[in-house]
Amino acid sequence: MDNAFYGFAVLLFCAVILLIEGLYLWWNSAHGGGAQRIARRLKVMAVATRDKGERISILKQRRFSGHELVDRFLHRQKIAHRIDQLLLQAGMKSTVAHFLGCSVAAFGVGFLLTFYVSMPFVLRLVMALACSLIPRAVVRRARRRRLVRIEVQLPEAADFIARALRAGHSFTNVLQIVGNELPEPLSIEFRMVREEINYGVPLNEALHNMAARIPLTDLRYLVIAVIIQRESGGNLAEILGNISQLIRARLRLLAQVRVLSAEGRMSAWILGALPFCVMGIMVVINPTYVAVLWTDPIGVRLLWYAAGMIVLGYFWLRKVIRIRV
């Protein structure tokens, strides 16, 4: 009797433990944190599909800030997305919040530096705004240099892909080989395409994403050639070889145009910087002599006329020396 009682007690204890464990697993699977995250995700997908007809991307969304609230606020601003695209094209790892912080800091430093010279508030504000554009100019310079490097690497990449296809490799394997063998920054973009394909993104969409990240006409030619070949067939290796020859010929023509327009570009730089350099030198040498420009009403009017003519001359020279090939 005692053995039967002890056995029954042990079995009852095990049953109670299993019952508690089962209830916990049921509650966790239905109401736990993971289940709530999945439910929210499905709800967002269902609402977006029903209301807007948009397809939810499976790729991880880029963060605009390390702080959650700031990140959500910036994701609702269109200008933040444009800044993030600019940073992405420049190959920088900085976030949008860091870029905006640098711009605000440059604005504050520029505004404080203007207190060392007596000038009207409007001119102080203009100088501070000009200083706030310094981070944007740095990022745009990095973007331009990176795009030039990618454009120079494109013919080699097209020939490399054509040779790999002739050797019998599939196009997805060729993307991995190109991402591993070619130098940066173009190899990074091909690796990103390969990773997106591994995550389940269609090949056409992954190539379109790369073309959106790199706004180069030559790269779009390459992407369009691959997409058309996959839809209608054809000798992709031969097409890529022709595209590489076309890109090389275009780069040679562009180099010739740059050489022929070098004098005009140098003149534009000198004429654009000359008024500011002369003004800065005169402010340092004899500030009372130059102060008439912002203390006298006629001088203020002359400053506005000069600013308008400088802006007009800048855009005119830009139009003259910018030759699209």
Image: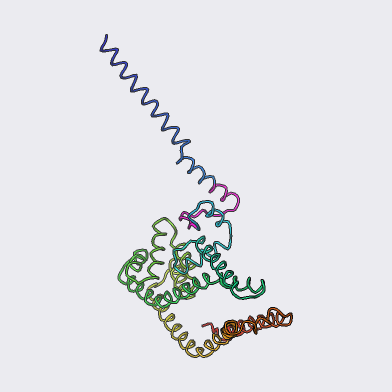
Residue 65 sits inside the magenta stretch: no
Q: Is residue 113 above or below residue 56?
A: below
Please indicate whether residue 195 sits to the left or right of residue 254 in the image: left
Query: In this view, which residue lies farthest toward the right?
Result: 297
Query: In this view, which residue lies farthest toward the left?
Result: 3
Depth check: 18 or 306 in front? Answer: 306
Residue in the image at 25% along x and 12% along y: 3
Please indicate whether residue 187 sits to the left or right of residue 213 in the image: left
How far from the left and from the top, in percent, is residue 315? 61, 81
How far from the left and from the top, in percent, is residue 76? 58, 56
Depth check: 182 or 223 in front? Answer: 182
Q: What is the chief secondary structure element of the magenta stretch?
A: loop
Please indicate whether residue 124 sits to the left or right of residue 196 in the image: right
Looking at the rendering, the stretch of residues picked out in magenta corresponds to 44-63
Residue 61 sits inside the magenta stretch: yes
How far from the left and from the top, in percent, is residue 283? 60, 82
